[in-house]
């Protein structure tokens, strides 16, 4: 299913369901944080914000929910669901372990409600066996982001960039859950991670298994590309390009290869209001554009600068092609 | 694994909908009321729309060369505004003749189009401003040409599309009381001469009606002086081109909602609030020497719920409220950008329309209300920003 890239990076075999998970209690949390760090189970990406930081926060404040999200960053790639289909035992074990370590009574696995049954069947079996709750959501970008996800599932408000643990939640994604599960069940270190690449230029999707520390350039070469300038990290709407020396590791695991759109001269705002209607966190992108033009931090604050999750929907829908996302990033850079 | 079945689409960093396409997406919605207008007003309606649109395009091409403001003028939104303007004008204006002859009305059509472009230029070159250029143009045209804009003719049901609107009797037929669709008897005329319900309602509610007998009650007005309500709902009353049929307007408006181009709150709230206000605001329940004004006419003896509701229905359908609520008030330049702002804006529009229709003019009330409420938009936008969810 996955193609190996880098040294010793063959996709691991799935764990037998008969393997029993280790016992754990909240008192074991500091020891487990240390163990996870030593085993290089570190993640910090949109779908799994700073795993170690979340667990450290859990030592200071109560956690009532552990969530493993299988919502895809890109529905055409379904990296998370592919992992869940193969490594369901590991994922269920990870959610249970984190639940016991943090004392969280609610342990949920969140999936797309319309994911194909072959993806869902194994995780449903594992969840039933481990007494976990499966929650199906109609996935609509950017619901994979922690801010709208926590709002939808628990009606809790999380500021972008803050740890979900501040709102009583430990949030992990399928690759992180798989790594935690393998450590818990087999004591296995994480040396490689799954990577999904959508090549828009050739119309091909790639699922790879890549050694941690492999340069992104080498991964691209494995799928026949040498040009880093065509690569987008995460969903393309976020407009994030990789650094020239980017390595595969704890960050984003989904990439898109596509030529950037031909530059288009922005028109004046036609006040269609689509950016406001489409914003998942209900901020006011045109006012933020004004705030950048007039360098007005008060206006930026009132328009919801702090709440923006930089999903890029405003720029995507804008008929006038205004650089809304870039303006927000510039404002953040200028005013913190 | 390499999945070769993946789509070969370009990156989805932009939806591909440009400003021009955004405005072009509105056009199909206008086809429904336009077709209804072409059906009941015939080729003169097509000619009137063409005259306005051609004038708008020509004027835009000239004015966009004038100064930096002209450089900001874009053809697509101005063309859409021109089409809306044409829909709000009556078809009988398309009448050939020497322009110096006072009876020749056709110069009003290109003049209105040129006026629209001039107003847009004055407002900064875009249709995005605190004033609705179409409403302003219509109000100015009405102020300048008054009675010439009152529609009085409608084609007979047997002459749809093909008839000549001005081939009609010179005065209304006293026996013309039935619904328009039933007027199928052979006639040497292509069209009927009927009194405009908007004009008649204005005379009554402004208290300037002089009754033929000793008195005229509200019930008598509805029963004897106005066409059947179904003529306003389906078609058959003399109206501006785009307002020939309330059903066609509704279908066009629903199309705009379906395409995500307008917010349903504005037409819904504006119409509901206007309807309630029309029931509550003082109206003459009977006109003798002087009108007898009463608040909440439904509770007045001799009026009752049925008459009051029928009167409100006539007011809603005879004036341009439906057209304004779906097509003009939802224009990006006129309405607030936030949901809460739009809600307040729609409520204000409904109230102002009801008041303007009752005490000023049924045919201009909604435009006056929109011109006034559009001035609230910058304030509502400033005060009612969306509340972030986090």
Image (cartoon, helix red, strand yellow):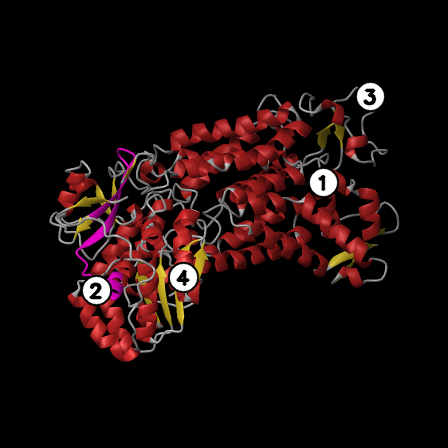
Say above or below: B186 vs B217. above
| Badge 4: residue crowd in 10 Å (few <14, some 14–19, many ≥20) | many
Q: Nearer the viewer, mark 2 or mark 3?
A: 2
Element type at mark 4? helix
Q: Are marks 2 and 3 in contact (CB under 8 Å)?
A: no
Q: Earlier in the sequence, mark 1 or mark 3?
A: 3
**Picture coordinates of residue B118, whole percent (x, y):** 44, 37
- Using the rendered view, name the quadrant where residue A24 is placed: bottom left
| Badge 1: residue crowd in 10 Å (few <14, some 14–19, many ≥20) | many
Q: CA distance from mark 1 to mark 2?
A: 79 Å
**Picture coordinates of residue B304, whole percent (x, y):** 82, 59
Q: Which residue is mark 2?
A: A187
Residue A127: numbered disc:
4
Q: Nearer the viewer, mark 1 or mark 2?
A: 2
Q: Nearer the viewer, mark 1 or mark 4?
A: 4
**Numbered disc 4: what chain?**
A
* Residue B286 seen in this snapshot: yes
Range of magenta residues: A182-209
**Could you say which is closer to the camera, residue B11 or residue A176?**
A176
Q: CA distance from mark 1 to mark 4?
A: 62 Å
| Badge 2: residue crowd in 10 Å (few <14, some 14–19, many ≥20) | few
Residue B232: numbered disc:
1
Q: Is residue A198 magenta?
A: yes
Q: Quadrant of the C terminus of chain A?
A: bottom left
Q: Nearer the viewer, mark 3 or mark 4?
A: 4
**Picture coordinates of residue B313, whole percent (x, y):** 72, 49
Q: Which residue is mark 3?
A: B186
Residue B358: numbered disc:
none
Residue shown at 27% from the left, 50% from the top:
A234
Q: Nearer the viewer, mark 4 or mark 2?
A: 2
Say above or below: A248 vs A68. above
């Amino acid at each position: 299913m996955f193609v190996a890239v880098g040294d010793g990076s063959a996709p691991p075999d799935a764990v037998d369901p008969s393997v029993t998970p280790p016992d754990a209690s909240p008192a074991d949390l500091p020891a487990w944080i240390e163990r996870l760090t030593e085993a290089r189970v570190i993640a910090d990406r949109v779908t799994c914000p700073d795993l170690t930081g979340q667990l450290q926060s859990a030592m200071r404040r109560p956690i009532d929910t552990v969530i493993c999200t299988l919502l895809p960053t890109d529905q055409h790639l379904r990296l998370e669901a592919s992992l869940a289909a193969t490594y369901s035992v590991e994922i269920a074990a990870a959610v249970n372990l984190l639940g016991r370590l943090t004392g969280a009574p609610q342990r949920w696995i969140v999936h797309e409600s319309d994911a194909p049954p072959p993806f869902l069947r194994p995780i449903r079996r594992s969840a039933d066996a481990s007494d976990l709750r499966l929650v199906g959501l109609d996935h609509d970008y950017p619901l994979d982001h922690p801010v709208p996800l926590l709002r939808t599932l628990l009606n809790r408000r999380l500021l972008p960039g803050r740890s979900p643990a501040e709102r009583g939640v430990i949030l992990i994604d399928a690759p992180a859950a798989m790594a935690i599960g393998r450590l818990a069940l087999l004591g296995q270190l994480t040396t490689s991670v799954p990577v999904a690449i959508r090549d828009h230029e050739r119309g091909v999707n790639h699922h790879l298994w890549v050694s941690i520390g492999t340069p992104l350039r080498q991964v691209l070469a494995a799928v026949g590309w040498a040009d880093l300038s065509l690569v987008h990290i995460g969903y393309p709407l976020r407009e994030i390009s990789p650094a020239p020396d980017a390595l595969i590791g704890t960050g984003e695991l989904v990439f898109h290869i596509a030529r950037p759109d031909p530059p288009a001269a922005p028109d004046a705002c036609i006040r269609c209001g689509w950016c406001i209607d489409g914003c998942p966190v209900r901020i006011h992108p045109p006012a933020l554009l004004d705030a950048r033009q007039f360098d007005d931090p008060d206006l930026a604050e009132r328009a919801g600068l702090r709440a923006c999750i930089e999903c890029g929907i405003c720029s995507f829908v804008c008929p006038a092609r205004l650089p809304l996302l870039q303006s927000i990033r510039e404002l953040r850079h200028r005013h913190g | 694994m390499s999945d070769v079945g993946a789509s070969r689409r370009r990156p989805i960093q932009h939806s591909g909908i440009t400003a021009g396409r955004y405005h072009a997406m509105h056009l199909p919605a206008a086809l429904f009321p336009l077709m209804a207008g072409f059906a009941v007003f015939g080729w003169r309606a097509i000619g009137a729309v063409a005259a306005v649109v051609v004038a708008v395009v020509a004027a835009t091409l000239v004015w966009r060369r004038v100064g930096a403001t002209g450089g900001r003028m874009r053809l697509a939104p101005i063309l859409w505004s021109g089409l809306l303007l044409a829909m709000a004008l009556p078809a009988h204006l398309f009448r050939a003749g020497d322009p110096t002859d006072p009876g020749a009305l056709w110069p009003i059509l290109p003049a209105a189009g040129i006026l629209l472009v001039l107003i847009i230029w004055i407002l900064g070159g875009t249709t995005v401003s605190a004033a609705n250029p179409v409403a302003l143009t219509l109000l100015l045209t009405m102020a300048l040409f008054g009675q010439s804009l009152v529609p009085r003719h409608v084609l007979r049901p047997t002459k749809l599309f093909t008839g000549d609107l001005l081939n009609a009797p010179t005065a209304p037929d006293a026996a013309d009381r039935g619904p328009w669709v039933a007027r199928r008897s052979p006639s040497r005329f292509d069209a009927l001469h009927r009194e405009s319900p908007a004009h008649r309602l204005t005379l009554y509610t402004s208290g300037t009606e002089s009754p033929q007998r000793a008195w005229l009650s509200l019930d008598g007005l509805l029963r004897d002086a106005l066409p059947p309500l179904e003529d306003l709902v389906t078609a058959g009353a003399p109206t501006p081109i785009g307002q020939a049929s309330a059903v066609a307007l509704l279908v066009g408006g629903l199309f705009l909602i379906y395409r995500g181009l307008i917010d349903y709150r504005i037409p819904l709230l504006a119409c509901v609030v206007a309807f309630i206000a029309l029931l509550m605001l003082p109206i003459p329940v009977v006109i003798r020497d002087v009108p007898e004004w009463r608040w909440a006419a439904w509770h007045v003896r001799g009026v009752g719920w049925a008459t009051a509701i029928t009167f409100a229905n006539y007011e809603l359908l005879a004036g341009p409220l439906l057209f304004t609520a779906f097509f003009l008030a939802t224009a990006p330049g006129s309405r607030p950008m936030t949901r809460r702002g739009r809600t307040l804006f729609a409520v204000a529009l409904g109230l102002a329309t009801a008041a303007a229709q009752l005490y000023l003019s049924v045919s201009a009330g909604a435009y006056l209300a929109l011109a006034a409420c559009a001035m609230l938009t910058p304030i509502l936008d400033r005060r009612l920003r969306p509340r972030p969810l986090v």
